[in-house]
Image (cartoon, rainbow, N blue to C red):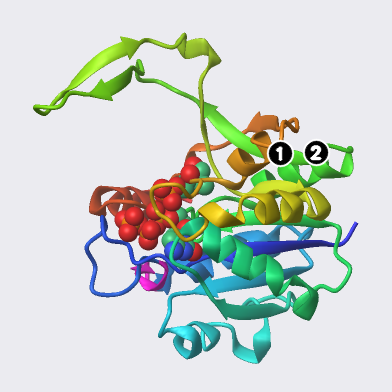
């Protein structure tokens, strides 16, 4: 089964507050995006990668992949400009799949922000696709008690519900899909893609809205998302221990 990955890297990283777009921020001297691409390539089950670059940074991002390959591998890379939301960026990546992996049947969607996701996690997701599942997300149990709330007009919020914690999972990337299903989900959800208030925060959400089944497989602590400076410090520590 030919499998390509869309690696989202077009975000600005507002919450990280760095001068560079988040995917270009160095972790132990190497941009987050390159760590993430290496993790995909090291799995041995990803045949090609499409990277979504921040607008205005196309050439800078392409230069991170000399010869159009993930460094240290033969995996080809195509770089495209991302969109205004993550959903729009993934759609832009999907539109370029045939440039680098014509006829691929399976697609992973991965965040450069989850730069330390390991090869075993990638293989676990792809194995579930090979076993016939159309949509696969990795997830980890939630340790906090989570409340559903509604905002109050004067500020603050009112608790509406406490979902049973054992039924909750915090989901990660890479998420895996049959290409046909993911492209259909993005086509049908396209009118939300450019509106940050309506765009979905993950691709499985679009597939769920079609009423299709999404399989959950175990995630891993290393696949944390770099969102704030504290996450970056944690990732530095994790990397120095590995
Ligand atoms: N328009 C966008 C927004 C996000 N992303 C990517 O989606 C992933 C998850 O997004 P997030 O962690 O929220 O990144 P940012 O949007 O950059 O962060 P912030 O919300 O703090 O600005 C990241 O790899 C990011 O580069 C993208 O490709 N295109
Ligand atoms: C796709 C994702 O990483 C799964 O947890 C997450 O939803 C991305 O969300 P963000 O708001 O774009 O960081």
Q: Nearer the viewer, residue 117 or 21?
A: 21
152 shown above or below 71? above
Percent x, y for residue 174? 62, 49
Label 1 to label 2: alpha-carbon separation: 7 Å
Q: On the rendered structure, is 93 left or right of 104?
A: left
- Numbered circle sitting on residue 136: 1
- Say whether residue 115 is visible: no
| Residue toward you, 193 or 122 | 193
Residue 76 lies left or right of residue 51; in this view the side is: right
Question: For residue 134, which quarter of the picture?
Answer: top right
| Front label number (1 vs 2) | 1
Q: Position of residue 70 (x, y in %)?
A: 64, 76
Q: Position of residue 25 (x, y in %)?
A: 35, 70
Rendered location of residue 62, percent (x, y): 54, 86
State the image quarter where residue 89 is shown: bottom right
Magenta residues (range): 23-29
Q: Residue 97 colored magenta?
A: no
Secondary structure, mark 1, is strand
* 22 vs 182, nearest the viewer: 182
Q: Is residue 3 above or below residue 10?
A: above
Residue 127 in the figure: left or right of residue 15: right
Is residue 60 shown above or below 8?
Answer: below
Location of the N terminus (image quadrant): bottom right
- Ligand 1's image quarter is bottom left
List the residue tagged with mark 2. 128
Judge whether 199 appears above or below 91 on screen. above
Graded by Cα atoms within 10 Å as few (under 14), some (14 to 19) or many (20 or more), the crowding at tag 2 reads some
Residue at 22% x, 16% y is: 158
Mark 1 or mark 2, earlier in chain: 2
Residue 202 visible at all: yes
User: Disc 2 on helix, strand or loop?
Assistant: helix
Residue at figure coordinates x 89%, y 68% from the top left: 103
């Amino acid at each position: 089964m030919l499998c390509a990955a869309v690696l989202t890297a077009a975000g600005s990283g507002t919450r990280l507050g760095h001068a560079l777009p988040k995917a270009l921020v160095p972790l132990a001297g190497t941009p987050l995006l390159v760590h993430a691409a290496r993790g995909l390539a090291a799995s041995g089950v990803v045949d090609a990668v499409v990277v979504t670059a921040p607008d205005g940074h196309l050439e800078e991002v392409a230069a991170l992949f000399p010869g159009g390959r993930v460094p240290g591998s033969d995996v080809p890379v195509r770089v495209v400009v991302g969109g205004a939301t993550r959903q729009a960026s993934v759609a832009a990546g999907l539109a370029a799949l045939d440039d680098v992996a014509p006829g691929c049947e399976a697609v992973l969607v991965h965040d450069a922000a989850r730069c330390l996701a390991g090869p075993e996690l990638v293989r676990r997701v792809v194995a579930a696709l090979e076993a016939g599942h159309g949509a696969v997300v990795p997830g980890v149990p939630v340790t906090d008690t989570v409340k559903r709330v509604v905002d109050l007009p004067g500020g603050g919020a009112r608790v509406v519900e406490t979902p049973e914690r054992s039924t909750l999972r915090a989901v990660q990337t890479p998420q895996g899909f049959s290409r046909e299903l993911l492209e259909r989900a993005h086509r049908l959800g396209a009118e939300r893609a450019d509106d940050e208030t309506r765009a979905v925060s993950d691709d499985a959400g679009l597939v769920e809205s079609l009423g299709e089944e999404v399989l959950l497989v175990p995630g891993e602590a290393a696949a944390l998302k770099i969102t704030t400076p504290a996450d970056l410090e944690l990732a530095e520590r994790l990397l120095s221990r590995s």
